[in-house]
Structures are given as C-alpha cells and as structure tokens.
Image (cartoon, rainbow, N blue to C red):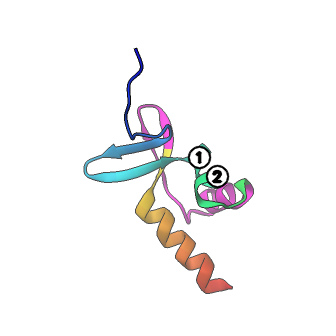
Amino acid sequence: MRLSNNVKPGWFFRNGRQYLAVSEVPRAMDLPAHQITDAIARGELRIERVSGCKVVELAEMMNYIDLLEGKK
C-alpha cells in the first residue's frame, strides 16, 4: 500500500517550529556543504536533535542566509 503525504524526508516539526536535517540543508538551500559545517562549527547555526537526527531550525537558517546576503 502506498501512502500519499506532503512530508518530505529531512523535514521535522516540533513545538510549532519547523526543522531541516543538517544533511538536507545544502541541497534545500543551494549552499555548499562546507559553508554549513563551518557555520555550525563557528556557532552561527545551532543544531538540535529530533528523533536522533541533527537538525537546524528553519527560521534560524533563514536568518543565516539573510546575514550571508548582507555580506555580499
């Protein structure tokens, strides 16, 4: 039996917030993977765990992208 839903792998919801798996961020946001890992290492992006998966809050990711746009 095939289930039809709109939930994509790597997307999570918790406490009314939307999260994206760290492994999916480069593809979803069209950014190089090293840029995301560097931002996490510098503390610019905070990771959390949801169901054992490392995730970034989508709102925080958008703020990071806005900062990148401001630096250009």
Helix, strand or loop status at disc 2:
helix
Question: Would you say the residues marked 2 and 1 are in contact, meaning their CB atoms lie under 8 Å apart?
Answer: yes
Q: What residue type is labelled 1?
A: Glu
Q: How far apart are marks 2 and 1 (CA)?
A: 6 Å
Q: Which amino acid does label 2 sit on?
A: Arg
At a point 46% along the width and 31% down the height, the residue shown is 52
Mark sitting on residue 27: 2
Mark sitting on residue 46: none
Task: State left or right for residue 25 relative to residue 31.
Answer: left
Q: In which quarter of the image is the N terminus?
A: top left
Task: State left or right for residue 26 relative to residue 56.
Answer: right
Q: Classify 10 Å Cα crowding around label 1: few (below 14), some (14-19), many (20 and above).
A: some
Residue 53: x, y in percent? 49, 36
Residue 43: x, y in percent? 56, 62
Q: Classify 10 Å Cα crowding around label 2: few (below 14), some (14-19), many (20 and above).
A: few
**Near-viewer residue (45 or 18):** 18
As drawn, 68 above or below 46: below
Q: Quadrant of the C terminus?
A: bottom right
Residue 33: x, y in percent? 71, 54
At a point 56% along the width and 71% down the height, the residue shown is 65
As drawn, 20 above or below 62: above
Helix, strand or loop status at disc 1:
helix
At a point 59% along the width and 60% down the height, the residue shown is 29
Q: Mark 1 points at which residue?
A: 24
Residue farthest to the top, as pictured: 1
In this picture, which residue range is highlighted in magenta?
Answer: 34-54
Task: State left or right for residue 18 relative to residue 72.
Answer: left
Image quarter of residue 44: bottom right
Q: Is residue 39 magenta?
A: yes
